[in-house]
Amino acid sequence: MKKKWSGLALAAGALAFSATAFAAPPSAEMLANACAGCHGTNGGSAGDTMPSLASQSASSIVESMLKFKSGERSSTIMGRLAKGYSDEQIKAMGGFFAKQKLHVTQQVTDKAKVAQATKIQEKSCGRCHLDEGKDGKDDTPVMASQWLPYLQIQMDLYTSGHRKMPDKMAEKVKELSKQDLDALMHFYAAQK
Amino acid sequence: MTLDRRSFLKLLAAGAGAAGLPMIGRAAEIMPKKGRRVIVIGGGYGGSIAAKYIRMMDKTIEVVLIEKNKQYISCPFSNHLLAGYIKDLSSLTIGYDKLAANHGITMVYDEVTAIDPAAKTVTTKGGNIAYDKLVVSPGVDFRTEEIEGYDAKTEELMPHAWKAGPQTILLRKQLEAMQDGGTVVLTAPLAPFRCPPGPYERVAMVADYLKKNKPKSKVILLDANPDIVSKPTLFRKGWEMYPGLIEYRKAAKVTAVNNQAMSVMVEGIDEVKGDVISVVPAQRATALMAGAGLIGEDKKWCPVNATTFESTLHKDVYVVGDSSSAGAMPKSGYSANSEAKVCATNIVAAMNGKEQVEMSGINTCYSFLSHDEAISVAGIYTVKEGKIVGVPNSGGISKLDYSDAKLEAKYANSWLKNILTEMST
């Protein structure tokens, strides 16, 4: 008896739920939406230690994720997460976030530091961090309006040797004081 | 897929309802349906997100979010009140005004008393509301009947505080009122339960409170499970911060409570007394889900299609969050958030005659060990052979040497800020 019912149920089930039998591979949106619990809806972060991904350059996201995945870039949680995705999926997510509008953060920055950093940015950083950090060049990330605490954490990781700087960046940072770097973080955070 | 006879008849009934057989004796329809409508029941970590993302993906679908309370209090981070890291629950409380206005969601503040999957209606205290698709994210009910002596008073005397709000405040007040030298008894039910790391974080939060305020006291965790369910190595290491304050007993299931004696019985033989006791009973999907025939053969949780989160028992009803059987995904706030987005994507696809999309989900859970040290577990989920599984060789727990704990606490605070902002804007 049981067998008979189960057979009928299978037939009915096949009819009722046939739509779910053929599913397309996860879309860029499907993949990226799962990130938003931590990085904010469409990658616009409300948490000041979590980077906004909205409007970030796609190649910068892809490069970071691939380095998280391989372990080349150290991380707390991102390495564990990045390992769950194929390179193609990572590219799709990068493309999704790059298309989103820049998330303008409301945060307090030090005006004097922002002013002080304007020239430093131009001289030392502006060749890669284009347009006051609003534009990325190749895999250079967009810096504008990023959260200050996040930028400070990353700069600490760079200067303490936990995160490796690109060679060009290392050359420039070497010439800058701690105060210069701090002012630069305020500068980028203040860009809108 | 196997169904018993009863479920099979229900399935047929659901099909008949969808085909438009006349329904007799229905209560008043309070919101006549004009176009396509999705109802979402429950405005927590799952429901708020399902409502929002359906509207983000298709503005032509009407979304009605039914929630009992005007405000929602987050369970994640509510243990912080016990430690005293927060003075009240305001930082964990969200409303729905901005969410509703930003996305054009119709809010109905009412209690749902029944779901009729055949008629495709939801009954609230105010009347009936019809749907084309229904998402239910109702949280959990407690299996209090499995604990001998557990009655209406027990919840006040030995608050579970496993639903954030008055229960959390009550437990905090009891800790404050306790004399130094007292014993706090915490319990963890058999897995699966809501928030797998929760009991182990809670014991650290209570220990931190005792260390700072009542150092002659101790906290005992009676765990029904054979060992710590989540991040065992990390929790053991973390608890070392509180030497002499924590006693962990595994395979110690609470089988009875004694309200008068303020004691619990472990495995029916060992009586443990406490000055403060928090009993967290085992859990299951809510009574509403049972009434609607959405609970599976295990009599506890709601079986769902792993790709869409559509109930395997009733068509056009979707279950996300703690009540669903989501395979390898734990019963966590982040899982509910992620499941709701998968569900929303596939509801919108189905309503527009488009192809279903394979699920891709994430869970991230942070647990605090002190006010500025946290650990995490992460997972990426996909579907294999009809089941939700973790993507091989991904996810896992924090570094065992605790070197990231301070940084992870900083990220955890942004986790909360972002996920609550997602739910409320």
Image (cartoon, helix red, strand yellow):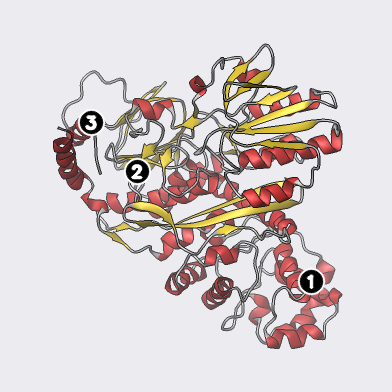
How packed is label 3: few (under 14 Cα within 10 Å), some, or many (20 or more)?
A: some
User: For the residues marked 2 and 1, what is the alpha-carbon distance in whole angstroms?
Assistant: 53 Å
| Type of amino acid at the residue the image marks with label 3 | Lys
Residue B163 horizontal/vertical position (percent): 58, 32
| Type of amino acid at the residue the image marks with label 2 | Val
Residue B21 horizontal/vertical position (percent): 16, 30
**In the structure shown, which secondary structural element does the residue marked by tag 3 occupy?**
helix
Circles 3 and 1 on the same chain = no
- Examine the rendering and report whether any part of residue B120 can be seen: yes
What residue does disc 1 label?
Answer: A114
Q: In the displayed structure, does residue B351 sit left or right of residue B140?
A: left
Residue B326 horizontal/vertical position (percent): 42, 46
Vertical position of residue B349 compared to residue A138: above or below: above
Q: In the displayed structure, does residue A121 sit left or right of residue B66?
A: right
Instruction: Compare residues B215 and B349 and report the one nearer the observer.
Output: B215
What residue does disc 3 label?
Answer: B10
| Type of amino acid at the residue the image marks with label 1 | Val
User: For the residues marked 3 and 1, what is the alpha-carbon distance in whole angstroms?
Assistant: 66 Å
How packed is label 1: few (under 14 Cα within 10 Å), some, or many (20 or more)?
A: many
